[in-house]
Image: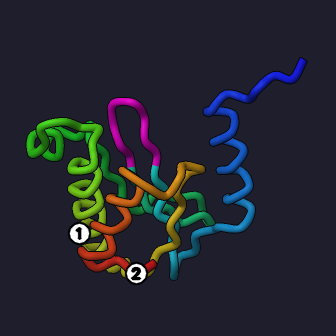
Amino acid sequence: MVSKKSRKEVRVHKHRKLRNRLSGTKACPRLAVFRSNSHLYAQIIDDTVGNTLVAASTLQKDIKGELERTNNKEAASYLGKVIAEKALEKGIKDVVFDRGGFIYQGKIQALADAAREAGLNF
């Protein structure tokens, strides 16, 4: 009998394949995105030293206070704007986008578009 892989297993497999091609450097760090059922997380990572340079999530009080819900497109676009502003404060303009194995639509696309509009290049 053929058994079907769970959606989580498929996503993790896609993410591993993506990570073989994507790597963040000091000049062009990686913007990694993760979404759970209730929250969104974004961080900018320098993979050469394994260091997180900037991080933001809908769990943070200042971000959560601005949002009605923490798991919709509006929350994703707000988080994209916030992560881009924090990155620009640190002098980061160019990043590599790591969608974390998630399909590029909906919340992931909203976060990416908002980060681009706020000034990040990828």
Q: Which residues are magenta?
A: 34-41
Side of 14 where 102 appears, left or right: left
Residue visible at 27% across and 42% down?
Answer: 72
Query: Going from the N terminus, do you reach mark 2 or mark 1 first?
Result: 1
The residue under label 1 is 85
Rendered view: 78 above or below 72: below
Q: Residue furthest top?
A: 1
Closer to the camera in the image, 92 or 100: 100
Side of 59 where 8 appears, left or right: right
Residue visible at 12% across and 37% down?
Answer: 68
Closer to the camera in the image, 54 or 83: 83
CA gap between label 2 and label 1 equals 12 Å
Q: Mark 1 belongs to which amino acid?
A: Glu
Magenta segment includes 117? no
How many labels, in total? 2
Side of 85 where 18 appears, left or right: right
Q: Position of residue 34 (x, y in %)?
A: 46, 45
Q: Position of residue 25 (x, y in %)?
A: 58, 74
Q: Are marks 2 and 1 in contact (CB under 8 Å)?
A: no
Q: Secondary structure at mark 1?
A: helix
Magenta segment includes 36? yes
Residue visible at 37% across and 81% down?
Answer: 93
Residue visible at 39% across and 30% down?
Answer: 37
The residue under label 2 is 121
Rendered view: 28 above or below 108: below
Closer to the camera in the image, 112 or 57: 112
Rendered view: 82 above or below 37: below
Residue 64 picture quarter: top left
